[in-house]
């Protein structure tokens, strides 16, 4: 074939094409100057090609034109937020370049995702992994396992004990024997990041049940060993609930012994202090002393002055904490923006009523002499950690598994309708629900709530849990904080009351809590940080949940992004579950 083609006549067109090619050919390589020019042109072409390829790099998400409030407390600025590979790639005005998704944030605020530093969503996330009520208020990270109530570890033979103990809070959970490490490893994919605490009450239950006494040497060793195992697995630290059984049966020596374990691991201590009413100053001093003695960070959770005897004392309480901080004690605190608390109904009774567990408690409550003694104690001291309340109308039934028709009614109303007093109403509910009744207690003054919120050292934490209007977590009438904490701060205390500036409020919900718990590359909008982002309308953001109708999502939360993945888009859940279990390591939590 080659020979045949060689013998064929060549057309004039072919000749002309060859001549043009020769004239355009690079200089001969035996010409040094020509070779150099050829190499230079080649390098320029490659450089231009790389530049074009770089300019065509596609970002995952660009949030355009929003007021970026970065979580540090600094004023906002208009800029675009660029997200690539799950991280913030750039924050700059007028970003140029293609993106797979572009969110128009003009007229809206772009902030870090909210860090809910105080939650109980370990009760609900296994059944509500979409974390509906949390992500729809802008939350991207939750700290779970607070108040001493963690759902792990669970030792052989102790499953029913823990199930009974947590029945008022998590009756739907499938409890099983587990180590804390196994629990963390098996935690389901969710729409939020989670940071986990191990609960002191749970450790005490596993070691010694509901016994009202100091632990034996073996029991103390077991608690310390379980704590060490949890910390080695990546738990943030230890939580305590010293206001209720069995935590209230622990002395300061027991807590100091456990805190020394925390120090070895560089872990934290988060405490629901022993009393939040008449002895709140003493209880706060106890928490500070543990931190100071053992050299550990302490978080005083849902700081409050409960009961009418203590109302008006917020400024003095803050001064006590600030004095400790000035001495170098690493202490932080948080609060929820409501005057109403929520807890199992049994915790309104004197702690001796709960000795021995649920069965022993129920047996006592049927005896008239026990009710009389409880009535006398309440008359003298109020409702334990909640102090004195104006009347039984300040206590509202939130969840009653066996008397759901009473949900939403006050104990005062129920007592009047049956011609007995509030103590009898409490005891009858506990017997009917086998201790699983949950209530709301209006025990705080709005002036104190505002005084605490105004303080730069007080962070925002909901003390709620992730629920939804549907399914098992849609039961009863839970505290509105489960749906509305963060929008309430932004709508009522920033926009309407001007108690805080927007940068101050966002810092309390993002950079502040992230620093307090040691989150790595989260809590701020910075290049290189994880892309946890919340976009909201500052003119409309507000809670809609009420005590009568709590299962209502807030308004004004437009977009929520977790680890670079939108979980709320246009105010609606996308179904994505990009959350991660964040573990404490030597360099922080991440």
Image: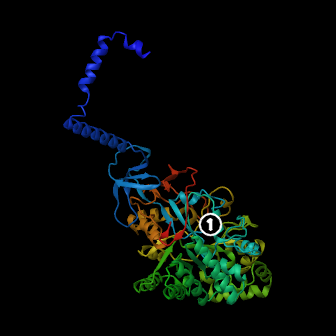
**Residue nearest the observer in this picture, 269 or 243:** 269
Determine the residue located farthest toward the front in the rendered image: 3
Quarter of image, res 397? bottom right
Q: Is residue 521 above or below residue 16?
A: below
Q: Is residue 444 left or right of residue 63?
A: right
Residue positioned 72% across, 83% down in the render: 208
Q: Is residue 325 above or below residue 582?
A: below
Q: Is there any visible trace of residue 378 in the rendered image?
A: no
Determine the residue located farthest toward the top in the rendered image: 9
Quarter of image, res 5? top left
Q: Is residue 74 left or right of residue 315?
A: left
**Residue nearest the observer in this picture, 59 or 558:** 59
Q: Which residue is mark 1?
A: 184
Q: Is there any visible trace of residue 162 in the rendered image?
A: yes
Residue positioned 63% across, 79% down in the render: 200
Q: Is residue 65 left or right of residue 410?
A: left
- Label 1 element class: helix
Q: Position of residue 77 (x, y in %)?
A: 33, 58
Q: Position of residue 162 (x, y in %)?
A: 72, 74
Q: Position of residue 538 (x, y in %)?
A: 42, 57
Dot 1 alpha-carbon crowd within 10 angstroms: few under 14, some 14 to 19, many 20 or more: many
Quarter of image, res 508? bottom left
Q: Position of residue 137 (x, y in %)?
A: 52, 59
């Amino acid at each position: 074939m080659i020979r045949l083609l060689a013998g064929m006549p060549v057309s004039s067109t072919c000749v002309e094409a060859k001549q043009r090619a020769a004239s355009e050919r690079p200089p001969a390589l035996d010409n040094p100057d020509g070779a150099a020019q050829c190499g230079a042109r080649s390098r320029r072409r490659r450089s231009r090609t790389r530049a074009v390829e770089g300019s065509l790099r596609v970002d995952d998400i660009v949030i355009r034109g929003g007021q970026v409030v970065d979580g540090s407390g600094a004023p906002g600025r208009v800029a675009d937020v660029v997200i690539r590979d799950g991280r913030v790639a750039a924050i700059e005005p007028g970003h140029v370049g293609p993106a797979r998704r572009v969110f128009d944030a003009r007229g809206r605020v772009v902030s870090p995702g909210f860090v809910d530093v105080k939650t109980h969503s370990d009760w609900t996330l296994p059944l509500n992994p979409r974390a509906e009520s949390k992500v729809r208020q802008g939350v991207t990270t939750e700290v779970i396992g607070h108040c001493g109530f963690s759902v792990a570890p669970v030792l052989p033979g102790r499953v029913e004990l823990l199930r009974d103990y947590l029945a008022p809070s998590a009756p739907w959970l499938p409890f099983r024997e587990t180590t804390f490490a196994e629990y963390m490893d098996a935690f389901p994919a969710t729409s939020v990041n989670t940071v986990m605490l191990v609960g002191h009450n749970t450790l005490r239950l596993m070691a010694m049940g509901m016994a009202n006494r100091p632990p034996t040497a073996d029991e103390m060793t077991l608690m310390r060993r379980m704590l060490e195992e949890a910390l080695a697995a990546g738990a943030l630290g230890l939580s305590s609930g010293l206001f209720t059984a069995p935590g209230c049966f622990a002395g300061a020596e027991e807590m100091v012994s456990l805190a020394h374990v925390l120090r070895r691991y560089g872990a934290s201590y988060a405490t629901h202090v022993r009393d939040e009413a008449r002895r709140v100053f003493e209880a706060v001093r106890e928490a500070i002393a543990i931190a100071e003695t053992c050299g550990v960070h302490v978080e005083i959770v849902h700081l409050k002055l409960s009961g009418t005897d203590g109302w008006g004392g917020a400024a003095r309480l803050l001064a006590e904490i600030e004095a400790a901080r000035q001495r170098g004690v690493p202490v932080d605190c948080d609060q929820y923006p409501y005057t109403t608390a929520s807890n199992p109904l049994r915790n309104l009774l004197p702690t001796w009523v709960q000795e021995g567990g649920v069965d022993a408690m129920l047996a006592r409550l049927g005896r008239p002499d026990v009710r009389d003694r409880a009535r006398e104690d309440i008359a003298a001291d109020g409702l334990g950690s909640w102090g004195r309340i104006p009347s039984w109308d300040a206590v509202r039934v939130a969840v009653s598994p066996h008397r759901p028709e009473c949900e939403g009614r006050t104990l005062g109303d129920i007592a009047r309708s049956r011609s007995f007093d509030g103590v009898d109403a409490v005891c009858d509910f506990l017997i009917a629900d086998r201790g699983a009744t949950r209530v709301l207690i209006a025990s705080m003054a709005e002036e104190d709530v505002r005084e605490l919120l105004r303080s730069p050292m007080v962070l925002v934490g909901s003390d709620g849990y992730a629920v939804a209007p549907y399914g098992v977590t849609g039961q009863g009438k839970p505290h509105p904080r489960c749906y509305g904490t963060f929008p309430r701060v932004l709508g009522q205390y920033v926009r309407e009351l001007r108690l805080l500036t927007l940068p101050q409020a966002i810092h309390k919900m993002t950079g502040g809590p992230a620093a307090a718990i040691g989150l790595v590359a989260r809590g701020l909008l910075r290049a290189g940080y994880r892309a946890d982002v919340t976009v909201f309308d500052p003119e409309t953001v507000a809670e809609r949940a009420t005590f009568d109708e709590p299962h209502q999502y807030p308004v004004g939360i437009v977009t929520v992004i977790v680890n670079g993945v939108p979980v709320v888009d246009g105010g609606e859940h996308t179904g994505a579950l990009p959350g991660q279990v964040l573990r404490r390591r030597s360099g922080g939590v991440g």
